Image (tube, helix red, strand yellow):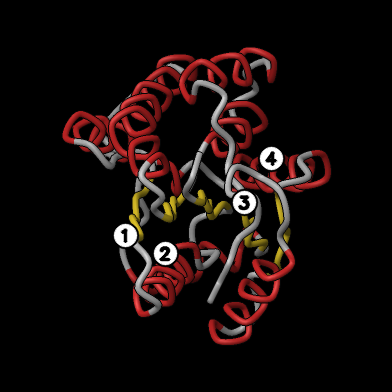
């Protein structure tokens, strides 16, 4: 892979969208080709799945939910992310396979080995150069969401569910070397400085290092 793949993870309200947009503009101003996508979605089929998954009227079994996320992820990986990386572009993605491990694995209680195996198939083994886990307390994340809009289906699953998801992210960050945990309670400017600092220090991954300048 010639490009660089950067993922933002965390609970809703952690600042993923704000920081992904900032990073997109940062690279764009420096003349890089940069693609911004989010999960679920990013393709016409994925957007239809997104509408189902986030609609509060949808009643889904946990395995059905997982399979829909993986179907959207596979389409996004094959049709958008891989082609962009192969031509040398930067790809910034809000959520990737870690979300399924956190939400459907830790949150819903599906066996982690199932989730991991399906994620491996859906992504064809593609992992990011760096995955930023923006860590915020559950209550703070929900408060931020409610200030901006009506919570969607996944955000309305209750505090206990979201606490299990938060615990899952903590454990994933401890065991995946490409994941970088950052304090999502910081102000947007300070958090973005932390992101740039972490990218400067990133080595390895598909990109052979993330170059900011």
Circle number at residue 136 = none
The answer to whether marks 4 and 3 mark residues whose Cβ atoms lie closer than 8 Å is no
Circle 2 SS class: helix
Rate crowding at label 2 as few (under 14), some (14 to 19) or many (20 or more) other CA atoms within 10 Å: some
Q: Element at badge 3?
A: strand
The residue under label 4 is 164
> What residue appears at the point 37 percent right and 55 percent down from the top-left corner?
151
Q: CA distance from mark 4 to mark 3?
A: 20 Å
Q: Earlier in the sequence, mark 1 or mark 3?
A: 3
Question: Left or right of 142: which side holds 59?
Answer: left
Residue 51 at x, y percent in the picture:
23, 37
Q: Is residue 4 above or below residue 105?
A: below
The residue drawn where x is 55% and y is 64% is: 14
Q: Earlier in the sequence, mark 2 or mark 4?
A: 2
Secondary structure found at label 4: helix
Question: In the image, which disc is placed on residue 131?
Answer: 3
Q: Look at mark 2 in the image and give the residue it sits on.
A: 17
**Residue on which disc 1 sits:** 150
Going by the image, does 174 lie left or right of 122?
right
**Whole-number angstrom distance, CA of label 2 to CA of label 4:** 22 Å
Q: Residues within 10 Å of mark 3 (few under 14, many from 20)?
A: many
Disc 1 is placed on an element classified as loop
């Amino acid at each position: 892979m010639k490009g660089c793949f950067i993922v933002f993870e965390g609970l809703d309200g952690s600042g993923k969208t704000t920081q992904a947009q900032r990073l997109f503009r940062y690279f764009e101003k420096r003349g890089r080709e940069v693609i911004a996508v989010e999960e679920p979605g990013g393709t016409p089929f994925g957007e239809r799945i997104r509408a189902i998954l986030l609609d509060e009227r949808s009643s889904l079994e946990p395995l059905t939910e997982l399979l829909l996320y993986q179907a959207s992820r596979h389409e996004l990986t094959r049709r958008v992310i891989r082609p962009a990386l192969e031509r040398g572009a930067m790809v910034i993605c809000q959520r990737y396979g870690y979300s399924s491990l956190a939400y459907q694995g830790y949150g819903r209680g599906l066996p982690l080995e199932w989730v991991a195996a399906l994620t491996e198939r859906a992504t064809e083994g593609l992992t990011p150069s760096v995955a930023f886990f923006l860590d915020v307390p559950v209550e703070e994340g929900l408060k931020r969401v409610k200030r901006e809009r009506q919570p969607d289906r996944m955000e309305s699953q209750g505090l206990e569910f979201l606490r299990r998801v938060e615990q899952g992210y903590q454990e994933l960050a401890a065991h995946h070397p490409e994941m970088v945990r950052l304090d999502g309670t910081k102000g947007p400017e300070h958090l973005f400085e932390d992101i740039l600092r972490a990218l400067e220090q990133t080595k390895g991954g598909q990109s052979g290092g993330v170059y900011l300048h």
